[in-house]
Amino acid sequence: MELSEILAALLEKNRFFYRRYCLKYIKKPDLVDDCLQSGFEKFLSCRRQFNSLQEAEKYLCRLLSNHFIDYLRRSMHRPLHLTAVTEKWDSTTPEELPEQQLASKQREIFRRQAVARICRGLEELPPHQREIVHLLFLREPPLSCREISRKKKIPITTVYSRFRSALRSLGSLCGDLAREWEKY
């Protein structure tokens, strides 16, 4: 099997995983595609032979992880270019009044902070709870509780228990966010 065929099979299987994996490192959604593309190019340029698709998948994950770290290191050493941002205001359009622009910016800032807090909340969950949340909601395609039970070889009641515990932990965080959202 050629490397391009292997990569196509891996992308078909794990397309959403690679994007989330990159976003975990890069933290900037607008750079994810470029970083992934260059990582996939590195994979295609390697002259390695793989015995199985699983071996190629492990190699690609290691390669991408190292590529993301290198990308972050390179970006830390780039000089910072400050650019002035100017906003134009047209007094003829009432929906663009400065007060409304400020309110929408504040909502957007809050939304970004809320997403970051939820991600941190997920990362703070114990690994077994985080895994259940990932398999139920973040994985493409998501698994059902019964499928998780079969796949992980654990009782379904344990899956339910871990999920309820994760929701309780995230619930307090989401309650705080809901109260803060009322201000906006």
Image (spheres, rainbow, N blue to C red):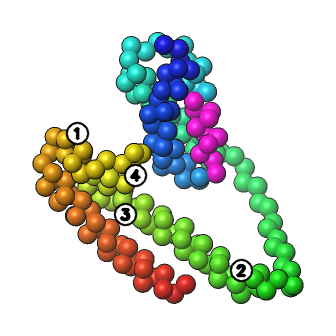
Where residue 66 appears, as percent x and y from the top left, is 50, 34
Tell me, for residue 100, which label it has, or none. Answer: none
Circles 4 and 1, Cβ within 8 Å, touching? The answer is: no
Q: Secondary structure at mark 4?
A: helix
- Label 3 is placed on what type of residue? Gly
Stretch of the chain drawn in magenta: 30-40
What residue appears at the point 28 percent right and 50 percent down from the top-left corner? Answer: 144
Reading the image, the residue beneath label 4 is 138
- Label 1 is placed on what type of residue? Lys
Q: Which badge, 2 or 3, comes first in the chain's sequence?
A: 2
Seen in the image, is 165 located left or right of residue 40? left
Disc 3 to disc 1, C-alpha distance: 25 Å
Task: Using a 10 Å C-alpha cutoff, classify the residue at mark 4 as few (fewer than 14 neighbours), some (14 to 19) or many (20 or more).
Answer: some
Disc 2 to disc 1, C-alpha distance: 49 Å
Q: Secondary structure at mark 3?
A: helix
Reading the image, the residue beneath label 3 is 121
Reading the image, the residue beneath label 1 is 151
- Label 2 is placed on what type of residue? Gln
Reading the image, the residue beneath label 2 is 101
